[in-house]
Amino acid sequence: MAEVNSMYRARLRSDDIKMQIEKLEGLAHHTVVNPTFEVFDEETEDILSRIFGDTHQYVESYNYAALGEAEAIVNLPESAQEPQTRDIPKQGLQQRRQVLQSILTDLQGLETEESRALEGEDREDPPGPS
């Protein structure tokens, strides 16, 4: 049996979403006029489109979150929102974070299912006469 490099860890799609959430935490301290938000939003939309496709509901949800209008999409009760989110820029940041966290949770579940489904597939006998 071939040895597997235990130091190697396959890059998961959820890793890209985690990185965006970390970036967002750093951006939360910037002002809205900072062009970094536009770059961040473009990067995030590209990642979501690459993972799920351009027309997936997650891409649409993120677009609404970037505008600060995602409450209905992610079913957030007003009491769950932070009090300072009355201004649209902070509300948009909070909603971006919540949408990305929701996507991350769903994606990690899918990756776990995929991993379980693929377990043992490389242990089959090679093709050819037995």
Image: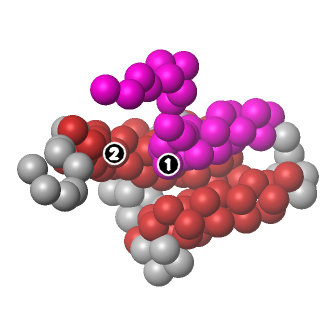
The spot of residue 52 in percent (x, y) is 45, 67
Q: Looking at the picture, tell me which residue is in the foreground, 84 or 36.
A: 36
Residue 3 visible at all = yes
Res. 85 in view = no
Position of residue 77 measured from the top left corner of the image (x, y, whole percent): 35, 49
**First reached walking from the N terminus: tag 2 or tag 1:** 1
Residue occupying the far right of the picture? 34
Q: Which residues are magenta?
A: 1-29
Residue placed under numbered mark 1 in the picture? 13
Front residue of 62 and 84: 62
Q: Residue at x 76, y 33 (%)?
A: 26
Residue kind at label 1, given as amino acid type: Arg
Image quadrant occupied by the N terminus: top left
104 displayed left or right of 92: left
Q: Residue 13: say if magenta.
A: yes
Q: Is residue 11 magenta-colored? A: yes
At label 2, which amino acid type do we have? Glu
Where is residue 99? Give x, y as percent: 48, 52
Residue 125 at x, y percent in the picture: 17, 45
Q: Quadrant of residue 48?
A: bottom right
Give the class, few, some or many, for how many residues have Cα within 10 Å of label 2's Cα (few <14, many ≥20): some
Badge 2 element: helix
Which quadrant of the view contains residue 4?
A: top left
Work out which residue is located at the far bottom of the displayed protein and give it: 55
**Label 2 sits on residue:** 111
Q: Vertically, is 93 above or below 63?
A: above
